[in-house]
Amino acid sequence: MITLGIETSCDETSCAILENGNKIRSNIISSSLAKHQPFGGVVPEIASRHSLQAIHAVYKTSLSEAKVQSNDIGLIAVTQGPGLVGSLLVGVSFAKSLAFALDCPIIGVHHLEAHLAANFILRKKPKKPFIGLIVSGGHTSLVLVKGSSYEELGATVDDAIGEAYDKTAKILDLGYPGGPVIDRLAQEGNPKAYFFTKPKVDGKFNFSFSGIKTAILHLVKGANGNQKRSPWKGKKLKDLCASFQFAVTSWIIEKTLNACEEKGINTIVVGGGVSANSRLRKVLEQECHLRGYEFFIPPLSLTLDNGAMIARLGYERYRKGFRSNLSLIANPSLTFVKNSR
Ligand code: KG4
Ligand code: ZN
């Protein structure tokens, strides 16, 4: 079966063609990143306008690269939420129009669930239950995936981990997005140079990342006085990035392993943009290896928002009997639990 996956929840516009749930024939991504850079973060109106302008060409390219015709499409999967409402509306409206024109089934899927599903395109899906760790620019959640239900064990009480990377990078004048650049600098710095206190949060599997950003702001302001630009450069900057990265990834890893231990689970599945992080990938894999746990993390090409993960989740759910129809609506705050059965 040929599944078209459409993703427009934030600043990426993506269409992918997936064959039988495990062969990516194309995965085209148009990013509006450069247009947001002057503002130091995603501007929702710019993101939705970009999607509107890009989606038709992205769709056409996904077909031609995959060497399929529109009539070959057997299922259309689209991100229903969560995300930016304007961007979501573009994808959902495009998907519904196409489903109507092609007389083809349509299914709306949950963006975060799809980040986990990205793992199962190229590798056999693990037996449930497993612990899902979702780390992205907008979300940080630990979920227990059991049968076909999702139990959220914990989530961030303030900033998402990707947001903490992005805001810290802004304080340090490193541009947007902050994750890749901090990760790169961190690899050349001393992770023990600065110590950041582990935040105390209610709920043992909840996270908090706003305190570390404020601590860094104070550190930098202390050295910076009233100057606008951060004077931190060279080794000092690399050490700060390494110490920040060491702290936030250690907190995440510790809670994920604690969740496995407490729930008696020995499989971890990670998804979301921050799953590209070098330390998170390396250390979590080592820890899983030591404990004999199965560990899933997507290849780098599938860590950021993409249509292939949407197509994969849509395909799985379609085979389980789920269907949407043309009354499907974008839901910017779609919850995990309600969307699953
Ligand atoms: O999943 P995603 O593409 O978008 C959302 O659904 O939010 O994630 C984007 C986030 C950004 O915050 C970006 O800074 C972060 O992923 N990111 C990273 C790395 N690469 C991207 N964070 C840490 N280390 C990285 N290597
Ligand atoms: Zn995402």
Image (cartoon, rainbow, N blue to C red):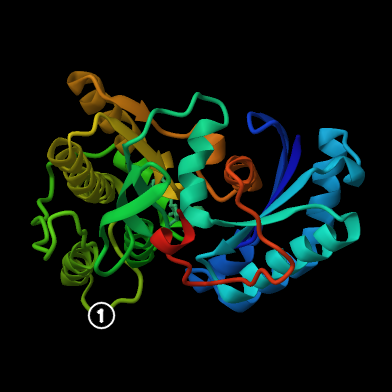
Instruction: Give the x, y percent position of residue 57.
Output: 84, 55
Residue 207 image-quadrant placement: bottom left
Q: Nearer the viewer, residue 315 or 302?
A: 315
Disc count in the image? 1
Vertical arrangement, residue 131 with respect to residue 11, above or below: above
Mark 1 neighbour class, 10 Å CA radius: few under 14, some 14 to 19, many 20 or more:
few
Disc 1 on helix, strand or loop?
A: loop
One can see residue 55 in this view: yes
Looking at the rendering, which quadrant does residue 84 occupy?
Answer: bottom right
Q: Is residue 121 left or right of residue 209?
A: right
Q: Residue 196 in the image: state x and y as whole percent.
A: 11, 55
Q: Which residue is drawn at 64% across and 33% down?
A: 21
Look at 27% across and 69% down and name the residue there. Answer: 158
Q: Which residue is identified by label 1? A: 226
Between residue 280 and residue 298, name the one nearer to us: 298
Residue 233 visible, this orientation = no
Q: Residue at x 25, y 80 (%)?
A: 226
Q: Cβ(mark 1) to ligand 1 < 8 Å?
A: no
Is 105 positioned to the left or the right of 260 in the image? right
User: What x and y, as percent, mark residue 43?
Assistant: 55, 74
324 relative position to 121: left or right: right
Q: What residue type is labelled 1?
A: Asn
Which x, y percent locates residue 241?
A: 27, 49
> In terms of depth relative to the viewer, which is nearer, 122 or 210?
122
Say which quadrant the N terminus sits in.
Answer: top right
Residue at the farthest front position = 321
